[in-house]
Amino acid sequence: MNNVLAPLRALFKIKDLRNRLIFTAIVIAIFRLVAHIPTPGINLAALKGLFDSSAFLSLLDVFSGGTLTNFSVMALGLNPYINASIIMQMMGMVVPSLEALQKEGDYGRQKINQYTRLLTIPLSFLQGIALIFLLRGQGLTTTADPLKLASIVFTLAAGTSFLIWLGEQLNDYGLGNGISLIIFVGIVTRLPVAAAQVLTTIDPSQIFTYLIFGFFAIASVYAIVRVGEAVREIPIQSARRGASFTSVVGNHLPLRLNQAGVIPIIFAVSFMLIPNLLSRVFAGSSQAWLASISRGITLYLAPNTILYNVLYFGLVVAFCYFYTAVVFNPEKIAKDLRSSGSFIPGVRPGPNTVDYLNFVLNRITLVGASFLGLVAIFPSIVSGMTGIAGLAIGGTGILIVVSVVLEILKTVNSQLYMYSYDKFLD
């Protein structure tokens, strides 16, 4: 229990952590304040009714932090930035110059982040235009003036840019990953609304189903925490040379079961939202074939369908492998081990060490990714069996919330260890 409460006590005792906590709270307050500034030209009452009647749009609203139901200046949320990140990571696998940047440490990450921000701007305009087309098709805009519609698009793009800036400030001066924190805050503020919608539609004959789902939800939270903390310890030995002898010191290299954290879930959800959003934009097209395809996508890629869950599971697993390959570099680890005189018992230094690390990493990533994918689609499966749409929305949100809380605790713990080390040196 003391290990759990130690980070919380450290937040108030250590000045640097306390300042980071205060800064994080201020940024979150600014985010929530701006999130309630509506964009002009939208029929908000009709928009709220549309979102309440659609499981897909409700899911989209949860991940925007409720900025879509009141169509605030941040209505696009971080979706353009997340999509830009996915594109940049994928391009890094096929463009040699970007692949080289990914291997250049902090400098490479800074350059890729810069390119990602630049790519976010045109994506924000494209998604803003698509959203305006969707709202016009539903008769939710109060103006048809092209200049006013263009001003709405520019406002949405500016809102996304401001949100990215807030996330970067949290990265530098706050607690944890700024983008994940903003998504976390948005989901937390909408989960009570989603829960209230479920509670108001409770069928007394399904009480037992709710109890079972609640039990599995608690069990899932426990399992997420356990898997998030699980590591595979690879034994490492280091040769230390003394005045007249050489000793071998044992140590270990910890490999997390889930190296990617919450990123695969965020990427997978954003990826799955794109076809649904585009299908709703073109559902009212004058071209019969385009309207037919759009209606088919809306029908078969609804959040509670089998195809949606299969694709969602596959994307979570794929992004787990993909992001693990980005954040963990076996070649660099093998090189560092060799330069420090360390080695894995029974494995020759160099290429053999790289192959062994890849072999172990692929196996543990398969376990972690499969677990994450199953937890991600389980609420949707239950929702499809019971017909309770809110379960799928709330389940995905809870999964992200728990994962982000774990990341925040790890950040606090790392700061706590640094403080203890500095204090020891003093």
Image: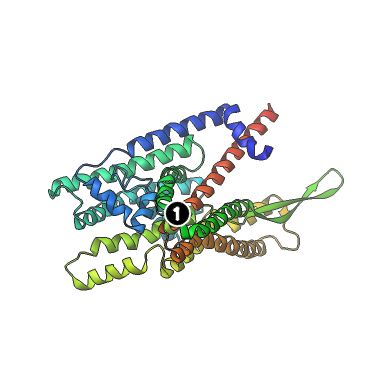
Per the image, the residue denoted by label 1 is 266
- On screen, residue 11 versus residue 296, left or right, reads right
Front-most of residues 61 and 150: 61
Residue at the image position 49 percent from the left and 51 percent from the top: 398
Q: At 33% from the left edge and 57% from the top edge, which residue is drawn?
A: 54
Mark 1, secondary structure of its residue: helix
Name the residue: 47% across, 48% down.
Answer: 109
Quadrant where the C terminus sits is: top right
Quarter of the picture holding the N terminus: top right
Residue 317, percent across and down? 51, 63
Quarter of image, res 269: bottom left
Dot 1, crowdedness within 10 Å: few (<14), some or many (≥20)? many
User: Residue 143, percent across and down?
Assistant: 14, 48
Residue 239 at least partly seen: yes
- The three-letter code of the residue at mark 1 reads Ile
Q: Residue furthest front?
A: 204
